[in-house]
Amino acid sequence: MIKDLVTPQNANVFVGKLGDILEKAIDKPLGYAINWGRIWSLWPVHIETACCSVEFGAASSPRYDVERFGIIEAFGSLRQCDLVVVQGTITRKMAPRLRLVYDQMPEPKYVIAMGACAITGGLYFDSYNVLPGIDGVIPVDVYVPGCPPRPETLIQGCMLLQEKIKRMKARKFV
Amino acid sequence: MSSDSEKEAVEKKPEESKPTETKPPEKPATAKPDEQKPAATKPAPAKKPAPTKEEPELPAFEKGIADKIIEKFGEKTTISFVKPDRVGIKVGRDDIHNVAEFARDTLNYDHVDSVAGVDYPADKEIEVVYHLSSYTDPTLSRQILELATRAQREEDPIPGNDATKLPSLRDIFYSVEFHEREVFEMLGVYFEGHPDNRRLLLPEDWADLPPLRKDFRNKGR
Amino acid sequence: MSSPTLPPGLAIQKADERIMTLNVGPQHPGSGHMRIIVQIDGDYIVACDPDPGYVHRGEEKMAEYRNYTLNVPHLERPVIHDSCNILYPYVLAAEELLGLEIPERAKYIRVIASELNRCIYTQYWLAIYGIFLGHSTMFMWPAGDRELLIDLMEKMTGARVTHSYFIPGGIRNDLPANFEDVCLRQVNYFEKRIKEYADVFYNNPILISRTEKTGVLTRENAIKLGTTGSVLRASGVDYDVRKKEPYDVYDELDFETNVMKDGDSYARSRIPWLDMMESCRIIRNALQKMPKSGSVRVKLKPNPKGELGSVYKRIESGRGALGCYIVSDKKVEPYRVKLSVPSFRNLIALPHLLIGEKLGNMPSVYWSLNYWPVEADR
């Protein structure tokens, strides 16, 4: 019977339907497993945008050691990454590049806005070359305030992001 | 705040440039030239020159540097100040190249520390200040020579295509290359003879006024 | 990327059949916040065009709207891990314009804070240099050791990296109780630690073979290009502003400058490390000579007005000579503030060093210039 159903013309449709059926059947356990996998291997892109990168570097140092919490040090290619930590001020020259980096990353992807400048423009609220926050460029998941945020704050922000991923629906991206 | 500052700038300038008004080809100097050229002083407002005349002994070495330049170029240069370790010279735009060459070849200054552009809308001029310093000459290691020159300022600048131009010093001091590029984009002063007058720091699509001009105002200010 | 709406700077240029143009950065593990456009023929770099400005935040324009004290927090942001040093020339220049004479104790504390900050900066730079060369131990060791000094600065100033400690008229607050002993202990331990770096990094044959004779800057070129700091001293020019034009109390302290003759990446990476040891010596010396009590700040009127004129002051920071040029027109705000930053001055050497090098040597040459992009862009 299956042989009759599946023809070369509708094979894709059938497989897609199968995917739907599978998803609905094992949505919860599979989603949980997928999210669990995502939580503990967040790969940040190595895109430094301003001075907060100093504290981002300090967060990977032996004292703070952000790798304990499943954030891997930022030296991967952006095609393998799923986290953008916007480390500070986004200038008008940097904004198209940031968007380009974000667009090139595969789904799912998450964004942490680190520092007051990335959130609202911060100290540079009246500068002619600084964007008032990055919300207009890319969607943000977690805001980490501070100027610059201490590494502990950044780690807390990452943990909040992990909490958020845990509650997200994994199905959309299966 | 803006109107206030402009008003004060306008009313400050004539009072100060009074002592130097005798020499028409020169640009009006902001600081006290009468330390060096007592002959040129007019009955100036007593407020300003009085304290400067109180300190007669200028640092000898720095004065020597200043005198050498004055001796060579005479009327074309003005001494704006002589302070310990700092000498300030004002040069017209036509002579800046020669004075810089003289400073390199005879006075042994070998590199430029910084190039700063300052906008003076009240004078309709933009000043470009070169800070010269020396690594090779041990007697000059404390010294900074400030060469200041002024370019004409346009109300509606078209950077690169208007009268705001100065000769480039890149063939004399190679180290000004990026500094002059920065001054060009920040104030719109085009450097003639500079091989590479491209944009450096600002975004590629910047279409506003050059940002360090005084008529460019930050948002909300 | 077939999108036709690329910004002009992102367009890919095709120059030649043999020559390939590469954009290194701004998203690249070996670039930081700048872009280096390199053209390569095979594996060799034939042209290089640095493209800074990704963190250009208009500090100099912003400084024209704030008074002399309010300028302190945002002017230290270009180099937050060297924040005392980048404020130093601004504060010296502002003091001259405002006519302030600062107390002796404040001068010593400034020197101590400045040297501690130099070590903090250099340790971060060294950590990144290590990771650029794929030497993970050299990331972990300096990044861990610099936390010791950060703790010390936190005790002193109250903030982890952005201290805002120097203000026109002195320093913001006095040292905490018992600071001298703690500082001496930490600095002695720190010096012992950084001496161990020689074993794992500086005498490492792999590092030496990677960095020796790459990116050679001759003495003549170093002078001609107007480089400064460790780049200059690695090329055999003995010029340190602390020695040549001593500010505050550097003329009373006992230290030496480090000079190397080779001018290659190895020499440029070794000089800052040697400087850190001199910094430890300066700190110990300053702790001895410092007056044990006294005021650390002169009282400043609210909204002080600078006297008419201009001042150019320079100091030696972790990267090189840092100058600040302030023009004042008797207002509450400075008329013009210009920071002459060492990173920007050293950037001009990059094309000269890279042309003829292999592409693989680019990170080591680039980062050996002691370059911090945020500072260069201001």
Image (cartoon, coloured by chain):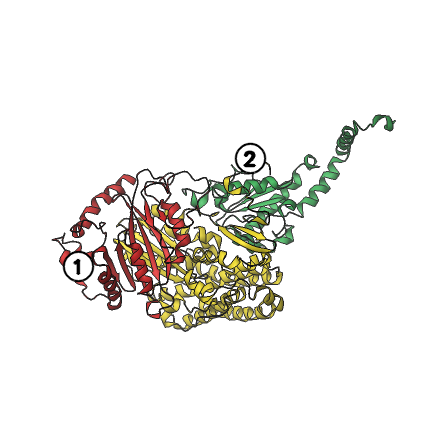
Query: Mark 2 near mark 1, Cβ–Cβ under 8 Å?
Result: no
Q: Which residue is mark 2?
A: C4
Q: Residues within 10 Å of mark 1 (few under 14, many from 20)?
A: few
Q: Which residue is mark 1?
A: B37
The residue nearer to you, when weighing C336 against C262, is C262
Taking the image as shown, residue C350 lies to the left or right of residue B90, namely right
Chain letter belonging to callout 1: B
Residue A76 rendering spot, x and y as whole percentages: 63, 50
Q: Which chain comes out green in the rendered image?
A: A
Give the farthest residue toward the left: B43
At label 2, the amino acid type is Pro
At label 1, the amino acid type is Lys
Does label 1 lie on the same chain as label 2?
A: no
Q: Residues within 10 Å of mark 2 (few under 14, many from 20)?
A: few
Residue C260 rendering spot, x and y as whole percentages: 48, 70
SS label for mark 1: loop
SS label for mark 2: loop
Give the farthest residue toward the right: A1
Taking the image as shown, residue C164 lies to the left or right of residue B14, namely right
Q: CA distance from mark 2 to mark 1?
A: 63 Å
Chain letter belonging to callout 2: C
In the rendered structure, the colour chosen for chain B is red
Q: Is residue C242 above or below residue C304?
A: below
